[in-house]
Image (cartoon, helix red, strand yellow):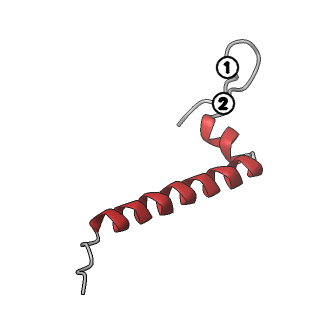
C-alpha cells in the first residue's frame, strides 16, 4: 500500500491525469480536436483510396 505522506516541500503532488480531468473545457477542446483530426484523416484516406471513375 502507498503511504499518504506529503511530498517534500509541504505540498501534495497532484497527478497529471487528475489535473487534466479537473479541467472540463480542456476535455471539451481535446474531444473536438481528436474528432476533427480523426474524421479529417479518415476522409482523406477514403478520397485517396477511390478508383478513378471511368469516362463514358
Please tell me whether mark 1 sits on a helix, a strand or a loop: loop
What residue appears at the point 23 percent right and 80 percent down from the top-left corner? Answer: 54
- Vertical arrangement, residue 12 with respect to residue 35, above or below: above
Whether pointer 1 and pointer 2 mark residues with C-beta atoms closer than 8 Å, the reply is: no
Q: Residues within 10 Å of mark 2 (few under 14, many from 20)?
A: few
Judged from this view, the residue extending furthest toward the top is: 9
Q: Residues within 10 Å of mark 1 (few under 14, many from 20)?
A: few
Closer to the camera, 14 or 30? Answer: 30
Q: Position of residue 39 (x, y in %)?
A: 49, 63
Q: Which residue is mark 1?
A: 7
Please tell me whether mark 2 sits on a helix, a strand or a loop: loop
Closer to the camera, 49 or 23? Answer: 49
Q: Which residue is mark 2?
A: 4
Judged from this view, the residue extending furthest toward the front is: 56
Which quadrant is home to the C terminus? bottom left
Q: Position of residue 17 (x, y in %)?
A: 61, 41
Amino acid at each position: 500500500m502507498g503511504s499518504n505522506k506529503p511530498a517534500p516541500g509541504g505540498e501534495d503532488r497532484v497527478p497529471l491525469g487528475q489535473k487534466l480531468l479537473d479541467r472540463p473545457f480542456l476535455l471539451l477542446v481535446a474531444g473536438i480536436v481528436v474528432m476533427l483530426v480523426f474524421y479529417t484523416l479518415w476522409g482523406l484516406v477514403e478520397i485517396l483510396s477511390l478508383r478513378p471513375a471511368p469516362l463514358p
